[in-house]
Image (tube, helix red, strand yellow):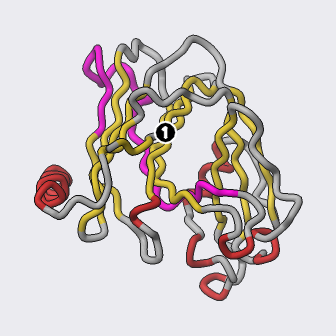
């Protein structure tokens, strides 16, 4: 099935399914001033429960990535590890930790509006959209993240977490090949096994060609 047909099917069937949650968008959701990214190696079960886990300060959004471990499927946290966590560390020029690590990035530069929306989960997929108006000629680097919001205490975690479950990276770095005025993506993202669909939200990160974090956007659900 082509990507367009898959998106159409997911969005269309979800509209016919019994409502499970309200519309979820980034409209009216203030952007945080900074991003705290926490990385845990899948080999280190104790790292998830570490009372010294960095906490997000005021106006800071925390994201949680689980890196594949050396033990493969036998790693304690292998069920929530994703390869894209390694790509994220590489993007930030960080070495993969044997246990855990964190990176904080401020949002800087002129304000950028990156709009997000997603529908309801259906048949292990969720329809998502991301729009950037007036992108100009900048070489943008975007990360669209499907995250599961986990409360503090779950599996012994001392902090609430936004666990990254799936990742999509649009090709927005070639301004000569794109239409002016709008960058947009409509995509069905897979929901991996073990995820609670009612806890899913979208987070998008947008960096310019110099690596500066220009937007940190997230969805909230409204009735």
Outermost residue toward the bottom?
74
- The picture quadrant where one finds residue 65 is bottom right
Q: Secondary structure at mark 1?
A: strand
At x 74%, y 43%, the residue is 56
Q: Residue furthest front?
A: 223
Q: Which of 222/60 is in front?
A: 222
Query: In the picture provided, is 212 more to the left or to the right than 185?
Result: right
Q: Residues within 10 Å of mark 1 (few under 14, many from 20)?
A: many
Residue 131's x, y, as percent?
34, 29
Residue 160 on image: x %, y %: 67, 57
* The stretch drawn in magenta includes residue 67: no
Percent position of residue 137, x then y: 42, 14
Q: Residue at x 50, y 61 (%)?
A: 165
Which residue range is magenta in the image?
160-185
- The quadrant in which the N terminus is found is bottom left
**Mark 1 highlights which residue?**
218
Is residue 86 visible to us here?
no
Which residue is at 82% across, 67% downward?
99
89 or 8: nearer the viewer: 8
Q: Position of residue 67 (x, y in %)?
A: 66, 65
């Amino acid at each position: 099935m082509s990507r367009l047909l898959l998106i159409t099917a997911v969005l269309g069937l979800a509209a016919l399914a019994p409502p499970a949650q309200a519309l979820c968008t980034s409209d009216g959701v203030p952007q945080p001033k900074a991003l705290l990214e926490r990385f845990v190696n899948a080999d280190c079960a104790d790292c998830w429960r570490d009372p010294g886990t960095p906490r997000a300060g005021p106006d800071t959004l925390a994201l949680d990535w689980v890196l594949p471990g050396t033990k493969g499927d036998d790693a304690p946290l292998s069920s929530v590890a994703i390869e894209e966590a390694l790509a994220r560390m590489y993007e930030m020029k960080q070495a993969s930790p044997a246990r855990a690590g964190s990176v904080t990035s401020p949002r800087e530069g002129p304000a950028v509006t990156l709009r997000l929306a997603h529908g309801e989960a259906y048949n292990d997929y969720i329809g998502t959209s991301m729009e950037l108006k007036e992108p100009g000629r900048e070489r943008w680097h975007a990360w669209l993240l499907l995250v599961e919001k986990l409360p503090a205490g779950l599996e012994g975690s001392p902090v609430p977490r936004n666990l990254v479950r799936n990742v999509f990276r649009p090709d927005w770095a070639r301004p000569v090949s794109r239409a002016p005025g709008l960058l947009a993506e409509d995509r069905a993202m897979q929901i991996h096994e073990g995820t609670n669909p009612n806890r899913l939200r979208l987070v998008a990160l947008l960096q310019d060609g110099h690596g500066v974090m220009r937007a940190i956007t997230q969805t909230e659900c409204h009735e």
